[in-house]
């Protein structure tokens, strides 16, 4: 009876260790994207004098989606949307930079490419 309990405990511990190792391997092989930090995004807008409105929040999230889907070409769509929303160039610039740095940092290469030399290309 004691041997059966010991064996069951050993099997249970081995299963836990195997599960932990499998979880670490999956996380290493398929890293999850950075989580959006909407609070920091809002603080950044406020810090740079942009009024925090539903439109500015929606544009921030739309930026992440559009740049993630279209790469550098998405910036033209964003500029048009900001103009239609009546946002100033200053406000649009702050929203774009804050969104990319705080909501979707994985899109930073697209922003750098757009700003520094590949405005018509797509960042892979």
Image: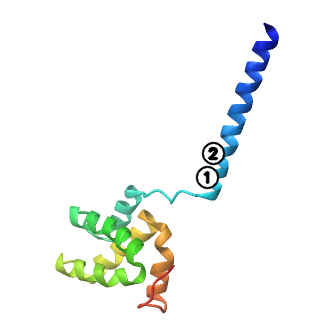
Between 97 and 109, the one lying in front of the other is 109
Q: Position of residue 40 (x, y in %)?
A: 41, 59
Q: Residue at position x 48%, y 85% from top? A: 113
- Residue 97 seen by the camera: no
| Label 1 environment density (alpha carbons within 10 Å; few <14, some 14–19, many ≥20) | few
Q: Are marks 1 and 2 in contact (CB under 8 Å)?
A: yes
Q: Nearer the viewer, residue 56 or 8?
A: 8
- Look at the numbered disc 2 and give the secondary structure of its residue: helix
What quarter of the picture does the N terminus occupy?
top right
Q: Residue furthest right?
A: 3
For residue 106, say whether it is visible. Answer: yes
Quarter residue 36 falls in:
bottom left
Q: Residue furthest top?
A: 1
Q: Residue at x 31, y 68 (%)?
A: 62
Q: Which residue is mark 2?
A: 23
- Residue 27 is labelled as 1
Left or right of 24? Residue 124 is left
Horizontal side, residue 78 vs residue 110: left or right = left
Q: Where's residue 79, x and y in %? A: 28, 82
* Residue 99 numbered tag: none
Residue 38 x, y percent position in the rendering: 37, 57
Q: Which type of secondary structure does the marked residue at label 1 adopt?
A: helix
Who is closer to the viewer here, 4 or 115? 4
**Residue 9 occupies quadrant:** top right
Q: CA distance from mark 1 to mark 2?
A: 6 Å
Name the residue at 48% across, 67% down: 105
In the picture shown, does residue 33 fall above or below 20? below
Does residue 9 appear left or right of residue 93 in this picture? right
């Amino acid at each position: 009876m004691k041997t059966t309990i010991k064996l069951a405990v050993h099997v249970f511990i081995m299963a836990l260790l195997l599960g932990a190792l499998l979880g670490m391997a999956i996380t290493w092989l398929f890293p999850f994207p950075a989580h959006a930090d909407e609070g920091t995004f809002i603080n950044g807008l406020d810090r740079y004098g942009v009024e925090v409105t539903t439109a500015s929040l929606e544009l921030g999230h739309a930026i992440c989606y559009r740049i993630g889907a279209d790469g550098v070409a998405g910036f033209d769509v964003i500029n048009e949307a900001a103009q239609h929303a009546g946002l100033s160039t200053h406000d649009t610039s702050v929203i774009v930079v804050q969104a990319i740095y705080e909501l979707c940092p994985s899109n930073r290469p697209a922003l750098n490419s757009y700003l520094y030399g590949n405005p018509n290309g797509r960042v892979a």
